[in-house]
Amino acid sequence: MYKKVLSYIKDNNLIEFGDKVLVAVSGGPDSICLLNILFKLKEELNIDIGVAHLNHMLRGEDAFGDEEYVINTCEKMNIPCFVKRMDIETYSKEQKLSCEMAGRNARYDFFDEIMKKEGYSKVATAHNANDQAETILFRLMRGTGLEGLGGIKASRDNKIVRPILCLSRKEVEDYIQVNNLNPRIDKTNFEKIYNRNKIRLDILPYMKKNFNDDIIQTLNRMSILIQKDNQFIEKIALSFYNKYCIESKDYFIIKKEMFEEDEVVINRVLRNAITKYSKSNYDFEMKHIYEILQLSKKNSGKIIDLPNKIYAENIYGDIYIKHRKEKNFNSNEKKQEINIDKGNVNNNTIDFNDFKIEFLVIENYNNTKLNLEKNNFIKYFDLDQIIKNISVRNRKDGDKIIPLGMSGSKKLKDIFIDMKIPKEDRDNVPILCFDDKIAWIVGLKVSEQFKITNKTKNILKVVIQRKEY
């Protein structure tokens, strides 16, 4: 058994010489088997071992019994033990996730926390060959592609490793019995109210009895072949991802040209984009990929919601992947106005949304002496054309401006569309008004009505700066 696991570790480069390995231990047979085997191999692998146990608080006294058992086991083995309690049921409701997904997220967040604090380089989890077979069938019934049929990988991100994925559940149980280990038993594993348990207790035994006595290993061999094929296709898809995707902190852009490629490539690029941006490989299904494909064929401005608090938007054929943001009613209120008296405008500064706006007066303007600098965020206006007040606000429905050089007015909505300003950004663009007439759509257009001419005597200089936080 030790040779089999050791060979699997080396063949798959799961653990390197000198690694500090954090073992995820629930207290059940699989994790106790994993902990015991790694403990026996630690000198040969030259590794340090620690244990992480998250009490999900889902099974009443049994959960606290598991916690105590893991602590006592670690004390006997003289290895560090890190324990955390978390009300997963409450957490799942807050995050709007299933208990299974919430528990998984909480566990891996806990592992990351310990790794950063204590310097562990790997996390070892106790998935075995039966888990692999169950996962493949579970994904098959939900609908999946090659990635899903590949099942559980031996390692992920060179951080999460599964050293006993090569062992069947029977081998684990035999190991437990031979070594007189007494793991905790989770009774919920035998309740058929969960789909995965139905696969474990009904479907796989039926397949084994009626179709293939070696079904577990058959599915595991298939997963290895599919993983290799999938890895090759992923390399090809990566080149298209690099060609058509633009990453930034606030959003991903998938260029419209990508949707002219083969659908197999498109699907993988889309999946990679949404999983990378949301930092989650879970909750996304093929239906979400198809929704984005349909979105690419619709008009600009159309939006679809996606899992993990992100959404996709068609902006002139390009697909933007963004996080959903809570509305800030103070900054996005469309009727918010800040008025400044014309007679007291010089050296006045105001804050508006994410901007600082500075007003300066230049008196007795002589166009032969003053060089008016050209800058999208510095503009000059004829102060004498302003009768009463100056105000800054967000856009309103029906807003119009007479753009510089034109005689007729144009709707702000049309200007935003022409200049390809995303819908969600439009409410944050400051609108500078003189006597309730739009003088400047900041950063975009200025008005013909307040331009400087040969007759101008006094100038209003307006400087816009984005605030730093």
Image: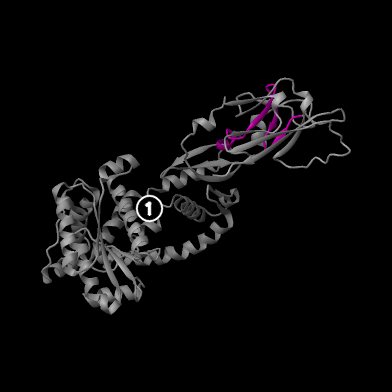
Q: Is residue 98 magenta?
A: no
Residue 373 spot, x, y in % from top left: 78, 42
Residue 447 spot, x, y in % from top left: 74, 30
* Residue nearest the viewer, comparing 220 with 126: 126
- Which residue lies under the disc numbered 1? 144
| Residue 28 visible in the displayed image | no
* Residue nearest the viewer, comparing 199 with 194: 194
Residue 249 spot, x, y in % from top left: 53, 50
Extreme residue toward the bottom, this view: 44
* Residue nearest the viewer, comparing 111 with 141: 111
Task: Describe residue 383's horizontal placement relative to residue 28 as left or right.
Answer: right
Task: Describe residue 349's horizontal placement relative to residue 368 as left or right.
Answer: left
Q: Residue at x 29, y 71 (%)?
A: 48
SS label for mark 1: loop
Q: Quadrant of residue 369 in the image?
A: top right
Q: Quadrant of residue 76 in the image?
A: bottom left
Task: State the quadrant of the N terminus.
Answer: bottom left
| Residue 409 visible in the displayed image | yes
Task: State the quadrant of the C terminus.
Answer: top right
* Residue nearest the viewer, comparing 116 with 284: 116
Q: Is residue 440 magenta?
A: yes
Task: Describe residue 189's horizontal placement relative to residue 338 as left or right.
Answer: left
Q: Residue at x 73, y 25 (%)?
A: 409
Q: Quadrant of residue 437 in the image?
A: top right
Amino acid carrying label 1: it is: Thr
Residue 314 lies, with reference to residue 29, above or below; the image says above
Looking at the rendering, the stretch of residues picked out in magenta corresponds to 423-447
Residue 209 spot, x, y in % from top left: 17, 60
Extreme residue toward the right, this view: 368
